[in-house]
Amino acid sequence: MDTNAHEIIYKDLAYKVIGAAMDVHNALGCGFLEKVYENALMVALQQRGLNCEQQKPIKVYYQGIVVGDYCADILVENAVILELKVVDALSDIHRAQALNYLKATGFKLAILLNFAKPKLERERIVL
């Protein structure tokens, strides 16, 4: 759901993130639990010199009051949210989850990564 076809935001950062995810997927293959890929991706991102936070809490506010919270799998450079999955196929529910993370944080880019298949599945979600 890349809503801005004219400009790719965080192009260089996204390229590094996807490269790290592909390295993890190539090394581990498919079949592990999501947490294994998350931990491995943290290592790969940090080895590339990227500042990352794992299981980053996200609060949702209504009129200044916290009304909900989420936990993003990985936040990279305080700019890009990574949501990892190990599922048969990415669905609209996964896309909506990433979009909600963007709305709650004000960030502009989330990347969905699905490690369940022989080829890494990835989607950019742009707010």
Image (cartoon, rainbow, N blue to C red):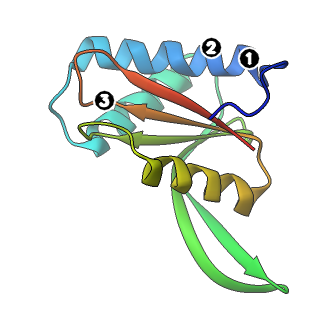
The residue carrying pointer 2 sits among few (fewer than 14), some (14 to 19) or many (20 or more) residues within 10 Å by Cα, namely few
Give yes or no for contact between labels 1 and 3 (Cβ–Cβ under 8 Å).
no
* Residue at the image point whose x is 24% and y is 24% from the top: 117
Residue 87 location in percent, x, y?
26, 41
Residue 55 visible at all:
no
- Image coordinates of residue 46 in percent, x first then y, are 55, 26
Residue behind mark 2 = 15
Badge count: 3
Q: Residue at x 29, y 11 (%)?
A: 26
Q: Secondary structure at mark 2?
A: helix
- Quadrant of the rendering where the C terminus is positioned: top right
Structural crowding at the residue carrying mark 3, measured as other residues with C-alpha within 10 Å and reported as few (<14), some (14–19) or many (≥20)? many
Q: Are marks 2 and 1 in contact (CB under 8 Å)?
A: yes
User: Mark 2 to mark 1: distance in Å?
Assistant: 6 Å
Any mark on residue 115, and which?
3
Residue 54 visible in the shown view: yes
Under tag 1, what secondary structure?
helix
Mark positioned earlier in the residue sequence (1 or 3)? 1
Residues at marks 2 and 3 touching, judged by CB atoms closer than 8 Å = no
What residue do we see at 69% from left, 20% from top?
13
Quadrant position of residue 110: top right
Give the x, y percent position of residue 2. Answer: 68, 30
How far is disc 1 from disc 3 in space, using C-alphas?
22 Å
* Dot 3: element: loop
Residue matched to label 1: 11
| Three-letter residue code for mark 1 | Lys
* Residue 30 x, y percent position in the rendering: 19, 25
